[in-house]
Structures are given as C-alpha cells and as structure tokens.
Image (cartoon, rainbow, N blue to C red):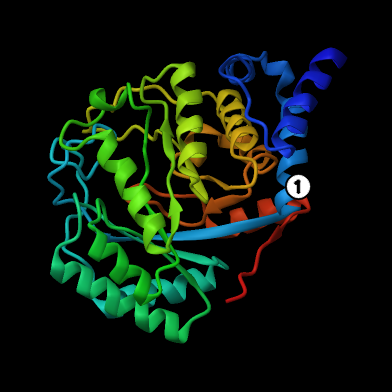
Amino acid sequence: MMENDLHWKSYAQKALKGERLTVEEGLSLLEADNDQVLSLLQAAFQVRQHFYGKKVKLNMIINAKSGLCPEDCGYCSQSIVSAAPIDKYALLDKDTLLAGAREAIARKAGTYCIVAAGKGPTAKELDQVVEAVREIRGTMPLKICACLGILKDDQAERLAEAGVHRYNHNLNTSKTHYPSITTTHTYEQRVETVKRVKKSGMSPCSGVIIGMGETDREIVEMAYALRELDADSIPINFLHAVPGTPLEHAGRTPAMKALKVLALFRFLCPSKEIRVAGGREVNLRSLQPLALYAANSIFVGDYLTTAGQDVSADHQMIEDLGFEIEVHAL
C-alpha cells in the first residue's frame, strides 16, 4: 500500500512539473485496483488544489435547439438515428435565452452554456445567438459558452466579438474509435473547430464521453489529444445510455472506474478546468462527492435531454466537502 501511495504521488509531482505521464503510466492508473482509488484521488487532489484550491466552478446548460439534427452520433438522443421520444424545437427566442441566463445566476453558475443541436449554425441562428449574447453580457455577471456545432472562421469571429467567452466542441472519443460512433462528420473536423475557436480568441472547451466501447488505451489517447490541443475546459461525460439510441444497451461506467478516469485527466491536463459532466448522477451515483477531489467543475441542473441532480443537492454536496462555489469576476 505504501509503495503504491508513493507511486501515485510521483504522478502528481510529474503533473506539477508539467511532465506528461507515459501511456503505460496512464494505463496503470486506469487499471489500478479499486482499493487504490482513495490514495489515487489524494494524489490527484494535490494537483487540483495547487491550481484551484477548494473552489468549484458551476456551469448551466440550456438546450437552445432540440432534435432536428442530421448527424448520426450513436450516443445522442437528438440525432437522426435516434428513436428516443424527446422534445423537438427550433432555436429558442431571445427572451427565453435571457430567462435561462437569469436562472443560471439563481443556481450560482458562473458560466451559461447555450447549446444547439445540429452540424453547425445557420446564418439566422447565429444572428439570434449573437443578439442574445450581447444583451446578456451587457446586463448580467455571467460568462457565456456556446456550443453550436462545427464553425467557419467568420462565425467564430462573430461569436467572439459578441462576447462569447468559451466555445465547446467535444472530441467525444479517440481518433481510432470515432468512425464507430459517428459517420456524418469526422474527428478531424472536430479538431479543426477547436483550433478555429482558439484562433478567434474564445477559450476552447472540448471533452469526451466515456463508456462507448473504447479501450483504456483509447481513453489515454483522448487525454493526450486534449492536452495537445490545449483545451482550457475539459468536460468528462459518462455515457447515459438513452433508450432509442444506438448505444441504448451500453452498460454504465462503474463509479470506481469513473474516478480513475477523472484522476487520469487531472494528471495529464493538470492546470485545466476538469468538469464532471453528463452522466455524473447515473454513473458515479453515491460517489459523486469524491469526483471533486480530481475535478473542479460541474454542471448544475438538467443536461440536454436528461435530468440532472437537484441544484440544492449539488450546493449541499460542495458545502459538505468543505469546498466553495467560485464566484466569477467579470
């Protein structure tokens, strides 16, 4: 036990020095015995505490456009190949987006995420988002994250000029595994969008979905890819298998494995915002509080088409840990 404790501490020291874990080290972490998870999290917390102390960043999503998506992403209830019974509607109007921003503030979220299903925004949709963002930025103490699909250069520049702080475009899985999850666009297109976001001056947000049939080696590859892209914010989703989607029969990620994944990303992307994202409640279940020893951010409220934990329970979880909600200064 003592030897393994020192082993994980050496990973923390490498991370704090900016050194990258090897593939073999990353695999050893994911394959560690479950009785090592507490000492592993203690080492991950060393890194998390160095960069973020005990602060927790809160984000809130609004599903600004639901369904009606031509993409065939196997995990998504909004895709063209999904038979899930979800609400379908065009982009919400400005007043509804503004109301969502006020709700984000009520939930103590510092970042408001405007998410729209689709391959990429139309000119009209971009105009609607830009108009709403300008009004939110002029009247409310919120950071804005947009997630509208694949962007062109001029679209990224318009969003940046409007005051969007961050743009999310997840890699979702590894390059080698990608074709088995989605065929209507490529992994390379996703990488290019993240690079385009960074070029525009917006903060790049990109993450993954764990539990889609990937191998441990591919999980390490995902962390390597996001480290190389220098994504500022990394949402770690754990598949919430929705009936009616191609991945509806995928099993849940065991809670202990989920904690190891979060520790891996903390070691490989030590200074970045690591967010426990979709599927947190159904995969981590009663072990959700332990996730915050590696991660420093969560979503509060519902996700796109699945329900989240009650907001008061999230606030209580943070308080019970002795952590505190980060208040963003704009």
Q: From the image, which quarter does the C terminus lie in?
A: bottom right
Relative to 330, 9 lies left or right: right
Taking the spot 44% from the left edge, 41% from the top edge, the residue there is: 207
Residue 198 vs 226, above or below: the answer is below
The quarter of the displayed image where residue 80 is located:
top left
**Image position, residue 21 (x, y; %):** 63, 25
Residue sitting nearer the eye, 293 or 305 = 293
The quarter of the displayed image where residue 152 is located:
bottom left
Residue 240 vs 316, above or below: the answer is above
Element assignment for label 1:
helix
Q: From the image, which quarter does the N terminus lie in?
A: top right
Taking the spot 66% from the left edge, 42% from the top edge, the residue there is: 289
Relative to 67, 318 lies left or right: right
Residue sitting nearer the eye, 115 or 176 = 176
Q: Residues within 10 Å of mark 1 (few under 14, many from 20)?
A: some
Q: How many marks?
A: 1
**Image position, residue 154 (x, y; %):** 24, 65
Residue type pointed to by label 1? Gln
**Image position, residue 104 (x, y; %):** 48, 69
Residue at the extreme right of the image, as rendered: 2
Residue sitting nearer the eye, 174 or 96 = 174
**Image position, residue 140 (x, y; %):** 48, 81
Task: Decide if residue 142 is in sight here.
Answer: yes
Residue sitting nearer the eye, 209 or 134 = 134
Dot 1 corresponds to which residue?
49
Residue at the extreme bottom of the image, as rendered: 139
Taking the spot 45% from the left edge, 72% from the top edge, the residue there is: 103
Task: Decide if residue 76 is in sight here.
Answer: no
